[in-house]
Image (cartoon, rainbow, N blue to C red):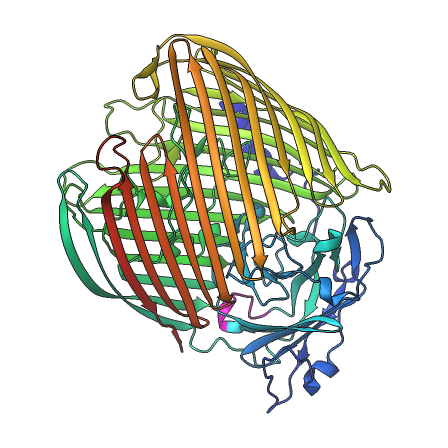
Amino acid sequence: MDCRPIYVTAFLAVLMGSPLFAQTADSVSERRTMTAERMVNGEAIELDGLLDEPAWQRAVPATDFIQQDPVLGGTPTERTEVRIIYSRDHLYMGVLCFDSEPDKMLGNTMKRDEYLRADDRFMWVMDTFLDQQSGYFFEMNPSGLMADSLMGSGGAQSREWDGIWDAKALRSELGWTLEIKIPFRTLNFDPDGTAWGINFQRTIRRKNEENLWTGYLRNQQLRQMSNAGLLEIDIQGGGVTQGLGLDVKPYITGGGSDSPGRNPPVPLSRSADLGVDLFYNLTPSLRANLTVNTDFAQTEVDQRLVNLTRFPLFFPEKRDFFLDGATFFEFYVPRRRQNSNIAVQPFFSRRIGLDANGLPQKIDFGTKLTGQLGQQDVGFLHVRTGDESTLVGEDFTVLRLKRRVLAQSYVGMFYSRRASRTIASSPEQTAGLDFRLATSTFRGSNNLEFNGFLLWNTDTAKTTPGDNLAYGVRLDYPNDRWEARVSFTEVQPDHGPAMGFTRRTGFRAYQPRLRFAPRPSQHPWLRQMAFGFDVDLRTDMKNQFLTRRLDFTLLRLELHTQDNLEISLVPTYERLEKDFEITKGVVLPAQSSYDFVRFRVVTNTANRRILATQTRFEMGSFFSGTREEIAVSLGIRPRPGVTLSVEQEWNRISLGTDNFQVRLYRLVADTQFSPWLYLVNNVQFDSMSQVMGWQSRLRWILTPGNDLFVVYTQNWLDHELFDRFATLDRRAAAKFVYTHRF
């Protein structure tokens, strides 16, 4: 079955416009509005959490939040007020979160950018271009935690972005207060604009209560920019400036490493180096970045995963240079879950400067351009790596363009090139197109999306072109009560993106999904239940089945206490095209096929508790035998700022006469002395590699933009009989980063 005509027809529909998706943005009169108060010359704000300056008193607050959960459209149990003022250089926010029981407020976490699943929180988004598709997300809690992210078109989010801003949280007998200072130099925006999109959300964790200023329907959510209200702000009349728009960010690193347990051993070596990042706002909406002599000494360690499949795992990017502005490079590809079962991803930045084992390669320099030009989102990247032992230097180039159309949609293109600088060979290239048609007003306030993509790549190993495409379409109805989806993807046998990621090639995938999630009205303990199925059908290019996975959710319960339970049944069919070595010495032969059924139970207790648990239990047949899996995670919060997490995953597998176990252990000790100083220790061991690893990472934020990192990493190999846990390698590094803004 050749589905290219389907794709072409769909893409033409985008270009021509479809009445179903051709809604226009809401008029100003239909959106909730607040006004930013201009500060008088000479006024200053002391960032102490006390909203006692005269400018705060002049500002008219945004109030009248609306409850989303547990009572849709209800009146919040606690009052919230938000005021916004601004000067020539800064935007200020003052937030009053009243609480009738201040001794019960939750604020255990202080670490920068940590997820606030256990705390009270205040979140806000700003659509600085008023395009209803992109913007900024911020988040704080009563202990002063600061988190932020970039929001891209189509719902893409880059949480690893660290904007330079400052804030102070203060607790009192009335509740908690936030005083926030965001430099205009941190934001990209339309210099001719008179209004931004804005919205706020407050979580009262002990009540599991969510309150929003606008867009409170459960199908909408805070991050859906089309549902934001308006912030009237006089950019030109207020004399708002970004200065020269130049940030100079030099850094110095030093450290040492050795590898006594590797073959061959590597003796101790010491190093010290300098580097610099330059950021320049070509326009208020377009930023250029140059990095020279790049070092990633501060990067967090990857979390190990158990892989009992015949396909590679996807590990997220963790390096700052590639994370900053990552949303501008996002390309639509269908996936069943976030970062899971990715069919193909044309740009995977871990292909740059990391070898197959995740070890770093020297990056000589990198340039990047991200932002907006009119209705276009622009992302451009060029990186050069240096020669190192067995690795040759390469040039990597990526260009990503997206044109916003209608109210919530886009069409886009992608191009990448990878070329060796020392070996005479043809460059690898990938080109692609994608689109998103979306509306949040389908049949009232429901979401509806139609997506598609097409990718092509060169293959230097072939003398004739062909079989090197990847394409697909998806129709999605992602709503609270009903969720439905159907998608088709084809990845041809010779498709291999130059700088991308593919789990497998040579298949066609058909993936329908249906979920029904009613909310029993005013139930004393049950908030929502769910039933449904998630299907993954994959064939080879001759339409013969390779995989048939039917994931039936028999029951899912979410309680008002935030505890939940899920019971699933997963019948699976697999046909192996190649020999599959599931573990050392255990091989399942090619051309064999297997039918097996697995039963799964997942439970989660509320993260807000001092002791929280997550468990997953699976049992049933597995290929030619059986498999039992138990995964347990235990989180302990003895006091604010201290978190201990213990995780264990155990698999017992029996395949005829072959019996083996796979184990994974992880211990994370997180000590947060303040929002500006924290220490994380991460210890991991898995039985497949027989390697135990430890990383200790200290981060001290002296002032926003000025950071000190101290990192120590050591790996041991378990020889089982002799010389148990002998040192493989170890590395100590320190990095100081300073930011100066012109």
Residue 45 horizontal side relative to residue 246, left or right: right
Residues 98 and 490: in front is 98
- On the question of residue 723 being in view, the answer is yes
Residues 317 and 406: in front is 317
Does the magenta run of residues contain 733?
no
- The percent position of residue 253, horizontal first and vertical second, equals 26, 64
Is residue 368 placed above or below 312 in the rendered structure? below
Q: Which secondary structure class fits the magenta region best?
A: loop
- The percent position of residue 92, horizontal first and vertical second, equals 61, 75
- On the question of residue 2 being in view, the answer is no
Give the quadrant of residue 552.
top right
Residue 96 horizontal side relative to residue 684, left or right: right
Residues 448 and 456: in front is 448
Give the quadrant of residue 555.
top right
- The percent position of residue 526, horizontal first and vertical second, equals 79, 39
Is residue 495 placed above or below 740 in the rendered structure? above
Residues 141 and 542: in front is 141
Q: Which residues are magenta?
A: 185-192
Residue 512 horizontal side relative to residue 653, left or right: right
Residue 176 horizontal side relative to residue 642, left or right: right
- The image quadrant where one finds the C terminus is bottom left
Is residue 695 placed above or below 467 in the rendered structure? below
- Name the residue located 23 percent from the left edge and 26 percent from the top edge: 461
Is residue 360 placed above or below 194 in the rendered structure? above
Q: List the single residue furthest toward the front.
A: 722
- The percent position of residue 248, horizontal first and vertical second, equals 35, 72
